[in-house]
Image (cartoon, helix red, strand yellow):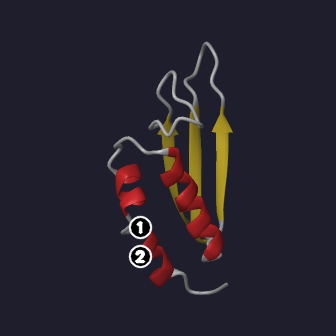
Amino acid sequence: MHDISKELSTILASEAFTNLANSKNLKIVEFDAIIALLIKLKIPFDVEFDPGNRRSAESAELSIFINPTTTLNFVISFQAGSSLFTGTTV
């Protein structure tokens, strides 16, 4: 296991993570950029997508594993009518 503190600090300071943490509208390209950075820096994470139904809204959960006892979890709720192909926000 390598020390990810420097890489994690860089990612968390990014505009995409700031928007995610502040519950601002997050664009699909920003979400993709976050995932690409996590992969590039070899930071372990999970993404779970729920397409929604009559009981729950469409959402995604991003879990970033810092160490065996620390995990950052972000839940992203998608607005009704958003599309992956139009560059709209989620």
Answer above or below: position of 65 versus 76. Answer: below
Disc ID at residue 55: none
Residue 80 vs residue 24: left or right?
Answer: right
Choose between 53 and 83: the one closer to the eye.
83
Expressed as whole percent of the image width and height from the top left, the position of residue 56 reads: 58, 22
Specify few, some or many for label 2: CA neighbours under 10 Å numbering under 14, 14-19, or 20 or more. Answer: few
Q: Image point 54% across, 60% down: which residue?
A: 33
Expressed as whole percent of the image width and height from the top left, the position of residue 15 reads: 36, 61
Answer above or below: position of 74 versus 76. Answer: below
Q: Image point 59% across, 68% down: which residue?
A: 38
Expressed as whole percent of the image width and height from the top left, the position of residue 35 reads: 59, 60
Residue 47 vs residue 83: left or right?
Answer: right
Answer above or below: position of 28 versus 7. Answer: above
- Amino acid type, residue under disc 1 in the picture: Leu
Q: Image point 61% across, 72% down: which residue?
A: 43
The residue that disc 2 covers is 9
What distance separates the C-alpha of mark 2 from that of mark 1? Answer: 5 Å
Specify few, some or many for label 1: CA neighbours under 10 Å numbering under 14, 14-19, or 20 or more. Answer: some
Residue 22 vs residue 56: left or right?
Answer: left
* Residues under numbered marks 2 and 1 in contact, where contact means CB atoms less than 8 Å apart: yes
The residue that disc 1 covers is 12
- Amino acid type, residue under disc 2 in the picture: Ser
Q: Secondary structure at mark 2?
A: helix
Q: Secondary structure at mark 1?
A: helix
Answer above or below: position of 36 versus 80. Answer: below
